Amino acid sequence: MTTFQQSTVLCKQAQSFLDREVQHLLIDGENVPAASGQTLTTVNPSTGEVLARLAAGDEVDIDRAVHAARKAFNGPWSTWSPYQRQALLTRIAQVLDEHFEELIEIEALDMGAPLSRLRNTKPAMMKMLSFFASQAVGISGETLMNGIPGKVTTMTLKAPVGVIGGIIPWNGPLNSQFWIIGAVLASGCTAVLKPSEDASLSVLRVAEILHEAGMPSGVINVVTGLGKKAGHALAAHPDVDRIAFTGSTETGRSIIQASTVNIKKLQLELGGKSADIVCADADLDKAVPGAAMGVFANSGQICFAGTRVLVQRSIVDKFTERLLAFTETLRVGHSLDATATLGPVISRSQLDKVLSYIDVGRDEGAELLCGGQRIGGELEHGYFVQPSVFGGVTNEMRIAREEIFGPVMSILPFDEVDEAIAVANDSDYGLGGAVWSQSLSTAFRVVHGVHTGTMWVNCYGHIDPLVGFSGTKLSGYGSKGSAAHMDTYLYTKSVYMEL
């Protein structure tokens, strides 16, 4: 038996969950079918085969879920103390730890990330839960001086904003949902989650586990369905107070428009085309694998992927040679293959999009140095594409300006650091970026010069909720992590007291 065949034996809990005839909605603590009775299918991107049937929720189901969330917000949940909410988050962390292997198997099958990658995400999940548990007891207002005649005491209070609509992307729902769930439970809000129709299963299973850990009914509700129906209905619902969305800039615009119905607060993490700047004095032993995995990790399906790799001209040849050698070591395989480094892209439509951009790059005159093909053989029925590298790219080319969301790197040479900064800033996006240099002066020159929400120096992709990250320009606004994250789940009430 091969390593891959051995790894396809699922744990009992994951198999039991996947064996359900239909994955229903979770509203007010109960698994319920869509009001219409309709379903849709979700596909295993490693095989192209149907993995599960999902309830196809629509505006009726969203309304039911919002009503449940509002009822919970106004009910006994509103009386929970900060210590009780902190204890709940601590229990949830313990229960999720016990279910982690089950959850990553479900996630691997549903969205295609290899188990090897998903196992490494456990510390990040636990950090998020620890962070939000600490935030639950850190919410505070201020006692303020004032200029009012007489004995008037003034202060501010912080209070939960209400019902949160969370729209979760398909490129990593297992972990990304906790940016919303953690803040909801820490603040005392409630939520309706709408996961992507391409990857809903881990969100549904986590919601069940939250109830097992003692979360009250109605605090977290999950409605699956198409974005144009369930997602739009959630964004436009007049009884939803805030939307947290991660996804494309195009969809973000539609959410902004829908939110005007009741002037919702928004947190938007949108598209990116991040620049990864490799200077001539960079330590290539770190910069080559760091820049490569800044693009290829999760098969390129990361918002802040550093897909524009700007390399100082004097080392372009050396960097490229070493990069191509490193790329050859990456093994693409089925998400349950224990030896795979990279998995498939999420869907056939995403595969077609990635391959079409590779054609665009060729047509624009860029040189395809490796990859560029759909992978056949044992993987021919899945949505696998080779890690691909283009050389000789200019910043005017579409492959350097448009988000591909696949394992496609563009190498752009530059001469002087100021030129690299200018090229990095010549983009509609501003989500991430990096610089590799052994000169602290050069590194900080780039850090201060590039207009983007997050910068890494001699590393790529580190995220910690204590620090947080955010975007600018068309990459959205609103922080994930840090005290600023919690602020968008709260509102400030000013109090004037004449005693």
Image: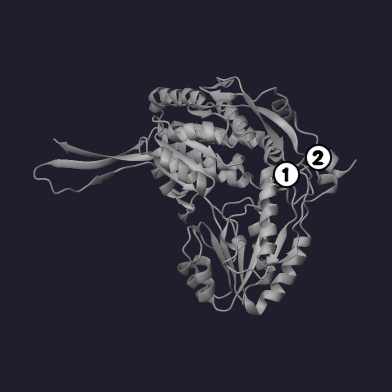
Q: Label 2 crowding class (10 Å Cα cut-off): few <14, some 14-19, many 20+? A: some
Q: Is residue 54 above or below residue 259?
A: above
Residue 112 coordinates in the image, percent (x, y): 70, 43
Residue 261, image quadrant: top left
Position of residue 202 in the picture relative to residue 376 (left or right): left
Task: For the N terminus, give its image quadrant.
Answer: top right
Q: Residue at x 43, y 34 (%)?
A: 236
Residue 308 coordinates in the image, percent (x, y): 60, 64
The amino acid pointed to by label 2 is: Ser
* The label number, if any, that marks residue 277 in the structure image: none
Instruction: Give the spatial CA distance, label 2 vs label 1.
Output: 9 Å
Position of residue 348 in the picture relative to residue 443 (left or right): right
* Mark 1: secondary structure: helix
Task: For the C terminus, give its image quadrant.
Answer: top left
Residue under label 1, please give it: 115
Residue under label 2, please give it: 7
Of labels 2 and 1, earlier in sequence is 2
